Amino acid sequence: MFNKVKDAINTRIINRLLDKKDIVRFSVNRNDRTGMLYKSWGLVFTDLIKGAYYEFGLYKGASFITSWKEYSKFRKWAVAQTKSDEFWRRQNIKDYINYRHDFYGFDTFEGMPANNEGSVTFHEKSFAGSFDEVDKQCRKAGMRYRLFKGLFSAIPKEEVRALEPAAIVNIDSDLYGSAWDALAIVRDKLQQGTILLMDDYNCFSSSDACGERRALREFCEKNPAYRFEPWMPYHFVGQAFLCHVEKS
Ligand SMILES: C[S@@+](CC[C@H](N)C(=O)[O-])C[C@H]1O[C@@H](n2cnc3c(N)ncnc32)[C@H](O)[C@@H]1O
């Protein structure tokens, strides 16, 4: 009984700490999705990378909104740098602070498309969300965002053309075909240093013949101008990459 109460109290304290916005050390040591998004935004702000956050596969919007929250910590930090008494810090951030990173989210909001990956988890219509609900949650979080509803493959090219280059691409749509379509959308948005998060990279027993692994392998074969350096694994099956653009 005593141990149960002790465990419950410990869990509450840990959850409070994890929720607390300014516990930076916690986020940097976390290896879950939140930690990965924190580290990604840390890299973006450290290297002063300009570009948007693209997320493919929103479901109920959890990681999309988490990304905004992690981003906001660095935005706050950057604003504070403008008042630093060290010249180089103020100089570094002077122009960058005027750049606002956009957040683009893509989903059917009706769940997984028909597919032949043979997974019960990812069968047609699983992970169905609601556009209105995600929209509401994003607004509530104070995000600067744009949602694209429909199959990735059906998003009009002229709409994509008008979007910002990519600072971070988060592909969380599980299936080979979906990851392939997502990569096709961002192909011309990739730049040196773009961070690619493949949330389901090691699904399907890490087989190169399935899922996101297959999509990235084929994408690289067809687009030799882009190389993806493995950065770090995260959560259970995720893998982060750093994009190199090897255009001559
Ligand atoms: C695992 S869920 C995403 C989880 C989400 N990132 C979160 O934080 O909870 C996968 C999502 O990808 C979407 N999806 C998969 N393939 C898609 C496609 N080809 N076009 C549009 N949406 C797709 C599904 O509708 C589903 O909502």
Image: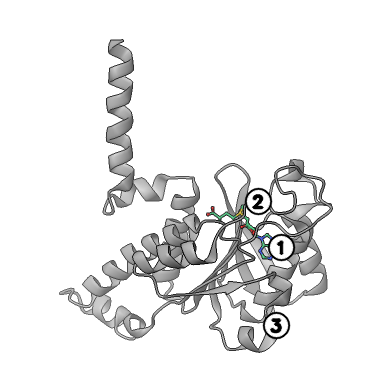
Q: For the N terminus, give its image quadrant.
A: top left
Dot 2 or dot 1, earlier in sequence: 1
Mark 2 residue's CB less than 8 Å from ligand 1? yes
Near-viewer residue (133 or 14): 133
Q: Are marks 2 and 1 in contact (CB under 8 Å)?
A: yes
> Which corner quadrant of the image does residue 183 belong to?
bottom right
The residue under the point 38% across, 49% down is: 27
Q: Residues within 10 Å of mark 2 (few under 14, many from 20)?
A: many
Q: Residues within 10 Å of mark 3 (few under 14, many from 20)?
A: few
Number of the label disc, if any, that sits on residue 247 = 3
The residue under the point 77% across, 44% down is: 119
Inter-mark Cα distance, 3 to 2:
28 Å
In this picture, residue 78 sits left or right of residue 52:
left
In this picture, residue 164 sits left or right of residue 99:
right
Near-viewer residue (246 or 55): 55
> What amino acid does circle 1 point to?
Ala
Number of the label disc, if any, that sits on residue 200 = 2
Dot 3 or dot 2, earlier in sequence: 2
The residue under the point 48% across, 45% down is: 31
In terms of secondary structure, where does tag 1 sit?
A: helix
Q: For the C terminus, give its image quadrant.
A: bottom right
Q: Nearer the viewer, mark 3 or mark 2?
A: 2
Label 1: which residue?
A: 179
**Residue 60 % position (x, y):** 52, 56
- What residue occupies the far left of the structure in this picture? 85
Q: Residues within 10 Å of mark 1 (few under 14, many from 20)?
A: many
Q: Nearer the viewer, mark 1 or mark 3?
A: 1
